[in-house]
Image (spheres, rainbow, N blue to C red):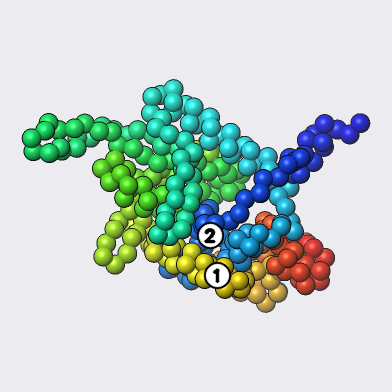
Amino acid sequence: MDKLITKLNKYITNPHILEERARLSHYPSGASAVSRINGDILGKCHRSSWYDWKGYKPTNPIDARGRWTFAHGNKMEAMIAEQFKQMGMWAGSNVKFYMQDKNISGEVDIFVFGDKVVKMAAPDKPPEEIKKIIGVEIKTAYGYGFQKSVSQAPKPENLMQCGIYLDYWSKLYPDEIDEWRLIYMARDTHETVEYVAKLDRTKEATKLTVDEKPYEIFYLEDVYERYKILGEYVIKNQPPPQDFKYGYEWVESEERFERGKISKTALAQIQSGKKLDSDWHCLYCSHLDRCWPEKRNSLGNKK
């Protein structure tokens, strides 16, 4: 008899019944923007999103490790929500929404009650006491990804999600909702770090602040513009350009090192052939073989 974990891993990657859903809207997890700092693409690749929109089956489906990672994240989110319930702060979980003017649909992880505030009522009525409501987005990481990355600064793509949520819900509940919390938890050490995101709406742009500091890497309008561009490619039935690259040439790797994109150790491993220089977005993309067929064949499907 095969090992039970082997059977389990096989099932978690290929269950008896697969859910089928038509793609009708953009998702916050697919947000992207062009960095105002260096022009880099931040967030989800348009080509990958286009394949999803068009219903292409993954050529590189998520493996068991990835499935367990997702499951762990979902359970961690549920555990945190349960603790908020016990504290009497819980206001909702997995709350769906649809932003009609942008055709974006999503689901909020958790809402919690904040401090009480006083809302002025009509002149002939007494003041009405209401509670602030705070949106919460839960993310997990581990090892270097937590200690040297998200514990130092939030990921831009995660802030894009928070910005979209905040833009929608703060307009719907202007007196109650004016901030979003982005919480990262380490899957290995269970350390946590929390960031407070707010919106700074001006005539020129809708900007984010993170822990009361202006965030200038992207504006929310940049994110919506990218959604609009992707939508145009979907309507035209034309695949958009690839935002990231699989298998950089050596001269490109040297340039990436000079720009601080890869470390000296990584450059040495690339030169010796021990490591393939690629954007991580491609390495973890479920459409990798479809998007880069010639390079995949010539490089022996290396990762």
Q: Residue furthest right?
A: 1
Q: Earlier in the sequence, mark 1 or mark 2?
A: 2
Residue annotated with mark 1? 235
Q: Residue furthest top?
A: 86
Dividing the image into 4 quarters, which one contains the N terminus? top right
Q: Is residue 73 something that shows in the picture?
A: yes
The image shows residue 256 at horizontal and vertical percentages of 60, 70
The image shows residue 119 at horizontal and vertical percentages of 19, 37
Q: Residue furthest bottom?
A: 251
Asked whether, in this view, residue 16 is left or right of residue 257, the answer is: right
Asked whether, in this view, residue 109 is left or right of residue 117, the answer is: right
Q: Residue at x 34, y 59 (%)?
A: 207
Q: Residue furthest left?
A: 124
Asked whether, in this view, residue 236 is left or right of residue 86, the answer is: right
Residue annotated with mark 2? 43
Disc assigned to residue 297: none
The image shows residue 192 at horizontal and vertical percentages of 49, 38
Dividing the image into 4 quarters, which one contains the C terminus? bottom right
Amino acid bearing label 1 = Ile
Q: Residue at x 89, y 34 (%)?
A: 2
Q: Residues within 10 Å of mark 1 (few under 14, many from 20)?
A: few
Element under disc 2: strand
Q: Is residue 272 something that shows in the picture?
A: no
Q: Residue at x 31, y 50 (%)?
A: 171
The answer for how far apart the CA atoms under marks 1 and 2 are is: 22 Å
Q: In front here: 232 or 186?
A: 232
Does 297 appear above or below 29?
A: below
Element under disc 1: helix
